Amino acid sequence: MRFRERSRRTTGLGFGLLAVATLLWVWCGVLLTTPYEIDRAYSTDPVECEARLFTDDGTANEGASQDPCGDERDWPEALALLGLSVPVSVAGGVLLTTGLLGARVSEHAAELARLRELAARDKGETGA
């Protein structure tokens, strides 16, 4: 029973890590596909900028530009989210697989023990 409980906990932890990886992917998608606003120091009005993924303008990685949005349009934050999601999703997948496999093996072993007990009981009844 403890083995099965540990397998259930491992499966739950795997699901949890996969949920966190999914949230990281969704967050990255939101960062890349939604427009955003930036505040300028010399003006009280914010500047509306296009989504990072759907623009043809430059980015902060290309150096200084005349476009204030281009200076704020950086990719490292989005790529960091994707990079962080990889080990989280791998760990979640491994834990989920391990937990599910452990539960299945435990159920299989219990079924084999039940069948052996049934066969021993039937053998004992026919031999008596």
Image: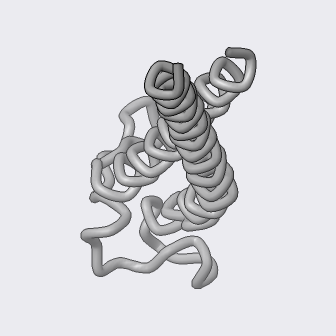
Which residue is drawn at the image coordinates 29% and 55% (left, top)? 33
86 versus 43 height, above or below? below
Which residue is drawn at the image coordinates 47% and 73% (left, top)? 66
Q: Position of residue 100 (x, y in %)?
A: 53, 41
53 versus 50 height, above or below? below
91 versus 43 height, above or below? below
Q: Quadrant of residue 58?
A: bottom left
Which residue is drawn at the image coordinates 29% and 80% (left, top)? 56
Task: Tell me if I can see residue 119 in this picture.
Answer: yes
Q: Position of residue 14 (x, y in %)?
A: 59, 38
Q: Quadrant of residue 47?
A: top left
Q: Quadrant of the N terminus?
A: top right
Image color mode: one colour
Q: Nearer the viewer, residue 112 or 71?
A: 112
Q: Is residue 26 left or right of residue 104?
A: left
Q: Position of residue 102 (x, y in %)?
A: 63, 40
94 versus 114 height, above or below? below
Q: Nearer the viewer, residue 94 or 78?
A: 94
Q: Position of residue 87 (x, y in %)?
A: 69, 58
